[in-house]
Structure formats: structure tokens, C-alpha cells
Image (spheres, rainbow, N blue to C red):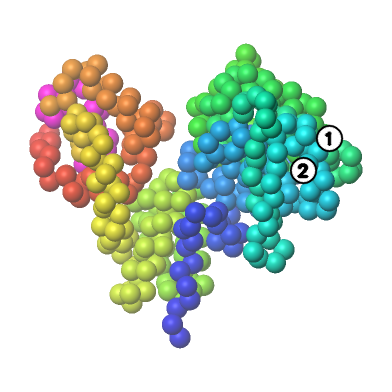
Amino acid sequence: MPPKRNPFQVTRRPASRQAFCDRTAELGRLHQTWDSPGAKLVMYGDRRQGKTAALELVVVFSLATAIGPEDAVRRLIQAVHKTIRRSWKTALNDLAVKLRFTVTLTPTPEQGGVPEFTLGFEPGAAAPHSGMFTDALDTIEAELERRRLRLGLGIDEFQRLLKWGGEDIEWALKAALEKHSRISYVLAGSAPSLIEEMVSNKNRALWKTVETMPLGPIAPEEFSRWIVARAESTGVGLTPEVASRIVTLAGPRTRDVIVLARETWEDARVNRGPGDPDRALAAHVDATADLHARIWQLRTDRERKLLRMLAVYPRIEPTADAVRRRFGLGPASTAAKALGVLVADEVLARPGGRLTFDDPFFRAWVALTTGEDIQPIPAE
């Protein structure tokens, strides 16, 4: 019997519950929030850790690709409409009047499909502003109160609101959270330093306003066991040793581990063997080479030197005098500035204070493509 389809899902949509590596405690905390009227929880962690997959288990929408407050409001209305369908058109029109924009509903071709929204502003109305998002939340709360309904609302990448309104929108959000009793909120984000500042600094709006739940990496042993179990369910076996190697090569980000598990499963299926994570990694790097080459070309010569060095010697200290001389990195201040740019551009990350590649597959591409050009460090 041929094996089933690849059990490791990697799509632009969040993983289904079955394909989501279990986070029992975190999911329990989320459901407790949804079941508590007026609850407010901030869930945060690095990108690709599984926050969106966890949120998909409830009503959720994302600001990750929203291009401004008008687009954010459209996504909010669309998400709420999917949950509250009864007579929502009337409520939507009321909301439009209060927020001073026009709404056009375009039916989707699928039977029972949710209409798409087009928002436009009335003649003479002010341009889109950051506060319109919290105005929309207030209006939805009022509509829920009128209908005696409750709503669990997940807002993914909520920290992007600050891009449109700075700290002013933080205070507007605080006011909304404190007075809403019909909406239970989970605010999720992938900017840990920024979000920790927002919730722990007593001079910021969300201090003591929300509960918090940092979302860290899944324990390697748990992830390995999950990989083995998922593969076994398809008739393609991945041994515990292979699963452990997958987690080591791709960790600690959840999505990266699943990408490599998918490729290793394919390697095992095609070669009718236990699967070779290193070979699978090389195959994935080759398949995505064009993307990584474009990223490489955008960097300066000094940044490339740093990336090549860190790809081959991940535990080296780039600003140490001997290291800078050996690899031609220039003055310490110049090297530090280049590292700061790479971190700000999310090419590198600094978890726990140690520099590392944000994307393990880009690191592998740099090492495989340019690593042979680097001078080896003599053994002491």
C-alpha cells in the first residue's frame, strides 16, 4: 500500500489541530480566556513558533499584512461577520454610519460564502486614522451588548497598531479593553522585546491591564516524539534518532522544524529508507536557492563577511579583536553597526544575547555556497 500524504503541513494557513504539535498548557490557557467574559491575554514569542496555529483554534484575524487602519478595520469586520451572521448586514451599516465610511458587500460565488467588504470614506470625511480601529471595537462591543452575545476575539500581530498610531493607540486600546465586557481578547505578537516593554513598563498603557503568556520553543524531546508519531501514521517511518536530528538542525522555531520534517519524510519515502535530515536540508536549500541568493545580494560586503563567518563558526564572537583581524571586519564599532543592521532586518537574531541566523535554511545556504571561501581557524 503506498504511503499516505505528507503529514507535515507547511502552508500559508495555520496548521490544523491534528497537525499541530500539542501545547496542552498554552491551549488550555487560551480556552480559559475565551470562556471568561472581558478577559485580556497577550501571547507573544518569536516568529514561526506556532502562535497563529494556536489562535486558529478560535475566532481570529491577523494584522500581519494589513497596510493601514482602514485595512485593519476591514479585516476586523470580516472576522466578526464570520462568527455573527444573523442580521449582520444591518449592524454593519450601523457601524459604517458611526465610523463615517461606506460599505459595499460583494457576495462570494460559493454557496453560503462570506461576502467580501470594500470600505470607502464619505465625502468630506477625515482620512483614515489610527483611532478608527478602537472605534470599531467599541461599536462591535455595543452591538454584542444589544444582542446579548459574547465574542472571543484573537488579534494576531497586534503590535502593528503602533505603526499607525504610536503610544496614543496603546492608550486607546487600553480604554477599549477595560470597558469591554462582551469581548474576550487574545492579543498575539512576534516582537518579544517590544511587547515585553508594552506590558511590563508601568509608564506604558498595557501595564497591569492584560495577562501575559510568553510562547517559547517546544521541548526538543516532545517535538521529536511528535515527529515520529506523525510519520508512523502514514507508513513512512522516521526513527527517534532521525527526528532528534531534524529538531537539532532546524530548531528552535516550530515552522522551521516542520519544514525539515516534511522534507525528511519525502526523502524517506523516495529512498525507501529511514530518512536523512542532512540530505533533506541540502535538497531544501537547493530548491530555495534563488530566494536566498536575493537576500545575499542585498547585503553589503561587510555584512556578507559577518554572515559567512557566523554560518561556519556560529559560536564565534564577531567583534573580538582577533576575529575582526582574521576576517577583515574593520573596527569594532563598524562591525557592531553592521551586526545591528542585520538584527534589525531580521536576518540575524539575538535570543539570549547570542547571535544566530533567524532562518536556519539561509544559514545553511550561506555555509554551503560561500563557506569554502572562509579561512579555517587554526586549532589551539
Q: Report whether residue 187 is seen.
A: no
Task: Give the camera-side residue of 154 and 103.
Answer: 103
| Quarter of the rendering occupied by the C terminus | top left
Say what amino acid the circle numbered 1 marks: Ala
**Span shown in magenta:** 310-327
Observer-side mark, 2 or 1, equals 2
Q: Residue furthest front?
A: 123
Residue depicted at x 18% and y 48%:
369
Quick one: label 2 or label 1, which is nearer the N terminus?
A: 2
Residue depicted at x 36% and y 32%:
345
In the drawing, does residue 53 fall left or right of residue 315? Answer: right
Q: Report whether residue 153 is seen.
A: yes
Q: Position of residue 4 (x, y in %)?
A: 48, 76
Question: Relative to residue 315, is residue 32 depicted above or below?
Answer: below
Residue depicted at x 89% and y 44%:
147
Question: Relative to residue 258, is residue 359 depicted above or below?
Answer: above
| Quarter of the rendering occupied by the N terminus | bottom left
Residue with the mark numbered 1: 142
Residue depicted at x 49% and y 54%:
12
Secondary element under disc 1, as helix, strand or loop, is helix
Q: Position of residue 59 (x, y in %)?
A: 69, 48
Q: Position of residue 56 (x, y in %)?
A: 62, 51
Residue 6: image quadrant is bottom left
In the drawing, does residue 310 fall left or right of residue 90? Answer: left
Task: Give the camera-side residue of 179 and 101.
Answer: 101
Task: Give the camera-side residue of 178 and 272.
Answer: 178
Spatial CA span between label 2 and label 1: 12 Å
In the drawing, does residue 59 fall left or right of residue 268? Answer: right
Say what amino acid the circle numbered 2 marks: Leu
Q: Residue furthest top?
A: 203
Q: Residue furthest bottom?
A: 1
Residue with the mark numbered 2: 92
